[in-house]
Image (cartoon, helix red, strand yellow):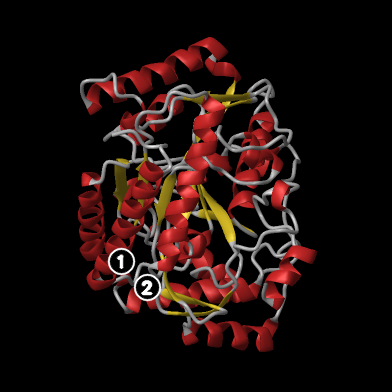
């Protein structure tokens, strides 16, 4: 065991830590360097970064422009609290974001990341209804397989039902709708029929709760961590229009899809023809170099609860590093790189090729589904011939994901396994040649895993 891995096992508790292996994990990779679309472990192995860190390394590793912007800002003004003052880079970043959001989403609130952005947006909705004399509006609509964060409210509206967690969440007012993935609902003859079912389910749930009691619906335009679920065409637009006609707020969680992941600064309007009341963002805003998140909220929303309409109330929510100058400077530098190098154009060119080449993996029997859009995709494995319990299937699905992950690592590719799904969201600078490398490594890993399953008698042809 390396010194770094030994220190990890002695002292660190990582996100989604596997408690049965706490202090005894000998497999975790120790990453020491990043360059472009690649990372390097302490053994010197070069790995194509399939997940782009955590959906966030938009412009790739080793960007001197971002490092210089951070260093310059640290020396000029290393910190300023947005509780009592503002700073020039915070104001400029807010203006740039507002210039790209749909409709009148012109008011920006900064947080420390995606979870705090979601939490803050939900609390703003609670405050708004209380100010407007509608305190009974507490119910929240979300989806199965959704991921919205690790704060208490964010985790409460997360629907990743196969997580092996025993942590408490807010249950009384949270309602989960069907995951908008036709692969998991094969009984529908067409995508249009499936979409009609989903919208009717939404209408029925609102009627059941009483529209006057529903606060908001929160939805990722594409469900990310839940398996890169791309909803049916018109689904996002119809969901938004359905809830808004009942006076229910619509929150688009663009923590993953914003800042170029789908080829646009924001995906809600440009990709899905949707005009939310609030858009949350984080991750790619700084290309992952320093933490930053936030939300954009519509002028219409804020006018109803500000000025004389505020009834003397304040928005008592914020963070020590809300709008801090250093992360905002990093975000502006990343923004400049994306513009100057035409990285959004690269997503439009390479993204379709990325999706097309990944779909060639469907000829492998282990592969149940390949899905994605832009520069985010998932390969879902399916276990043929399984006859055991759900618990047994879950254990085998975890094992299959781990096997594919291990083989990918051997072939120079880092993927993000989510049980039996391999999730990929590479840096937006990816080339077609690197797509070919990624798909080849994935093919080898899947074929070797299938061979292992056959030898172990787990796979039955």
Along the line of sight, the residue nearer the viewer: 17 or 407: 407
Which residue in the protein does label 1 denote?
A: 344
Q: Which mark is residue 360?
A: none
Identity of the residue drawn at 75% across and 41% down: 313
Nearest the camera: 188 or 298? 188
Q: Image height check: is 301 above or below 361?
A: above
Residue 338: assigned label: 2
Question: Vertical placement of 11 versus 458: above or below?
Answer: below
Q: Position of residue 387 (x, y in %)?
A: 43, 23
Percent x, y of residue 331: 51, 71
Tell me, yes or no, whether the two marked residues, 1 and 2, touch with CB atoms within 8 Å. Answer: yes
Label 1's element?
Answer: helix
Badge 2 element = helix
Judging depth in this view, the residue of 334 and 359 nearest the camera is: 359
Residue 79 rendering spot, x and y as whole percentages: 72, 76
Which quadrant is the C terminus positioned in? top left
Q: Residue at x 58, y 55 (%)?
A: 294
* Residue occupying image coordinates x 29% and y 57%: 443
């Amino acid at each position: 065991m390396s010194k770094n891995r030994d220190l990890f096992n002695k002292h660190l508790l990582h996100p989604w830590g596997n408690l049965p292996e706490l202090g005894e994990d000998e497999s975790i990779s120790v990453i020491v360097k990043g360059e472009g679309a690649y990372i390097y472990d302490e053994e010197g192995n070069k790995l194509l970064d399939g997940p782009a860190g955590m959906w966030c390394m938009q412009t790739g590793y080793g960007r001197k422009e971002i490092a210089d912007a951070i260093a310059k800002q640290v020396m000029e003004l290393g910190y300023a609290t947005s509780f009592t003052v503002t700073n020039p880079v915070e104001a400029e970043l807010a203006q740039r974001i507002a210039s790209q959001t749909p409709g009148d989403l012109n008011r920006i609130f900064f947080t420390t990341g995606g979870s705090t952005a979601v939490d803050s947006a939900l609390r703003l909705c609670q405050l708004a209804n209380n100010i407007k004399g509608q305190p009974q509006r507490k119910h929240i609509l979300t989806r199965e397989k959704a991921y919205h964060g690790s704060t208490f409210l964010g985790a409460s509206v997360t629907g990743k039902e196969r997580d092996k967690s025993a942590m408490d969440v807010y249950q009384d007012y949270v309602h989960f709708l069907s995951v908008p993935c036709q692969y998991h609902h094969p009984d529908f003859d067409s995508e249009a029929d499936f979409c009609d079912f989903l919208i009717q389910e939404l209408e029925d749930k609102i009627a059941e709760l009483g529209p006057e009691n529903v606060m908001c619906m929160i939805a990722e335009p594409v469900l990310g961590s839940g398996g890169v679920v791309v909803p049916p065409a018109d689904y996002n637009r119809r969901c938004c229009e359905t809830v808004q006609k009942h006076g229910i707020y619509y929150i688009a969680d663009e923590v993953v899809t914003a800042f170029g992941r789908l080829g646009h600064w924001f995906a809600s309007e440009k990709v899905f023809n949707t005009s939310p009341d609030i858009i949350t963002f984080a991750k790619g805003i700084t290309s992952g170099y320093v933490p930053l998140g936030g939300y954009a909220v519509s002028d219409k929303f804020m006018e109803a609860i500000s000025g004389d309409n505020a009834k003397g109330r304040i928005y008592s929510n914020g963070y020590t590093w809300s709008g801090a100058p250093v992360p905002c400077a990093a975000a502006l530098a990343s923004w400049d790189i994306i513009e100057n190098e035409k990285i959004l154009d690269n997503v439009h060119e390479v993204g379709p090729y990325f999706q097309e080449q990944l779909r060639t993996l469907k000829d492998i029997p282990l592969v149940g589904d390949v899905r994605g859009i832009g520069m985010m995709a998932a390969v879902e494995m399916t276990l043929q011939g399984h006859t055991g319990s759900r618990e047994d299937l879950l254990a085998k699905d975890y094992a299959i994901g781990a096997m594919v992950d291990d083989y990918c690592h051997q072939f120079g590719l880092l993927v993000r396994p989510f049980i039996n799904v391999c999730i990929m969201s590479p840096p937006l600078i990816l080339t077609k040649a690197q797509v070919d490398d990624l798909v080849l490594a994935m093919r080898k890993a899947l074929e070797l895993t299938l061979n292992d399953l056959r030898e172990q008698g787990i796979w039955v042809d």
